[in-house]
Amino acid sequence: MKEADYYESTNGVVVMVEPYSQQEQIQQIVYRILDANLDRTREGLRIIEEWCRFGLNNAQLAGECKYLRQELAKWHTAEIRAARDTVGDIGTDLSHPQEEQRASIKSLLQANFCRVQEALRVLEEYGKLYSPNMGKAFKQMRYRVYTLESSLMGYQRHQLLWRSHLYLVTSPSDSLFATVESALKGGLTLVQYRDKNSDDTVRLEQATRLRQLCHAYGALLIMNDRVDLALAVDADGVHLGQQDMPIALARQLLGPQRIIGRSTTNSEEMHRAINEGADYIGVGPIYETPTKAGKAAAGLEYVRYAAQNSPIPWFAIGGIDANNINDVIDAGAERVAVVRSLMQAEQPTLVTQYLLSQLNRVRPQPEIVQN
Ligand SMILES: Cc1ncc(COP(=O)(O)OP(=O)(O)O)c(N)n1
Ligand SMILES: Cc1nc(C(=O)O)sc1CCOP(=O)(O)O
Ligand SMILES: [Mg+2]
């Protein structure tokens, strides 16, 4: 027989309380686990929702977060809430040093997706002890959160691509990382890792470091030529030339969220790339360049054509530097890609700032003739 506990209530009456049986104690523990993880999931979703709403102005993504929060609330019953024991919870003081620091919105979002997914997994497993439907409901919710993560991260990437006006394509260099970091400090948001000759081991190692560096500055990293390496280093996308993998195949391998760029030299290649689903195109070479020796210049005429006809972001490339960038801009370019201008610069931060200042300059609009 269980022994009763006695306690004195506030009005002085001594009340006899039956202690929990072992089974009831386990049930209370399960309720506490469910309570803590329902809260954790809701909080994480709220943090993600605020970015969708205020950061991205995206009603659809914010609506999905809100819907998931409301679904969670339905499971947060009074009996689960009643099991809460904040004072006796040894976990409330535990935090990881990384929780105190977030390098960027991207890492903040990733940390919270991770937290939500972990908590949903806990809810799925312990929920099975509460009701068979609870386990199923949280399994479905976990898949919806994966889809949300993929849409949001892909959306972020594409937004940043559209906001990027200067694109650094790297060349092999002893000071590769220092140069890229210096340009990132100047405001660069788009980098392509291009190394035509090194072994894959070197490419993997360098591209991984570059991806970490770019993401720490909130910039995108694109891999030149190689879809497999783009996936291996978790790059934001791939740049494919006319001789590289077809866009449709790359899309199958990379999925809808990663970026695919295509080089074009003339209007026919431009329209084909757009129809095949490229996210951006390279337009060039504008001028002949030793970086791509032997390739005839497409010239400013092609820049004028792209300015009139490309509905997707396009980057003028080939022989562009601080001296001629204004000619390229005057022909209609709003975005430019460079190799030597930054890779060989003594002060890449300053050159980046200068190139960006020219690209961001508000240009006088053609005069409107009044009748
Ligand atoms: C932005 C951008 N535009 C064009 C190219 C050239 O790509 P490709 O024709 O495949 O030549 P390689 O770079 O592979 O030599 C590019 N890389 N980036
Ligand atoms: C890699 C590349 N692709 C080009 C194209 O036209 O497709 S031009 C080019 C090299 C651009 O180098 P720089 O800025 O040093 O002239
Ligand atoms: Mg190529």
Image (cartoon, rainbow, N blue to C red):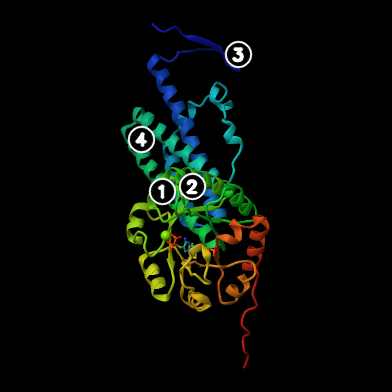
Residue drawn at point x = 49 percent, y = 40 percent: 42
Q: What is the number of the mark on residue 134? A: 4
Which one is earlier in the sequence, the residue at label 2 or at label 1? Answer: 2
Label 4 vs 1, first from the N-terminus: 4
Q: What residue sits 43% from the left and 42% below the top?
A: 201
First in residue order: circle 4 vs circle 3: 3
First of labels 1, 3 by sequence position:
3
Q: Amino acid at mark 4?
A: Met
**Neighbours of disc 2 within 10 Å: few (<14), some (14-19), many (20+):** many
- 251 is higher (above) or lower (below) than 315: above
Residue under label 2, please give it. Answer: 207
Say whether marks 2 and 1 touch (CB < 8 Å). yes
Tag 3's secondary structure? loop
**Which three-letter amino acid code belongs to the residue tagged 3?**
Gly
Give the side of residue 107 with respect to residue 248, left or right: right
Q: Is residue 179 above or below residue 93?
A: below
Query: Left or right: where does residue 126 sit relative to residue 13?
Result: left
Provide the residue designation for mark 3. Answer: 12
Q: Nearer the viewer, mark 4 or mark 3?
A: 4
Pinpoint residue 283: horizontal percent, then vertical percent.
48, 69
Residue picked out by circle 1: 229
- Disc 3 residue crowd, few under 14, some 14–19, many 20+, Cα 10 Å: few
Residue 170 x, y percent position in the rendering: 53, 55
> Residues under labels 1 and 3: Cα distance?
74 Å
N-terminal-most mark, 3 or 2 = 3
Q: Answer with mark 4 or mark 2, whichever residue precedes in sequence.
A: 4
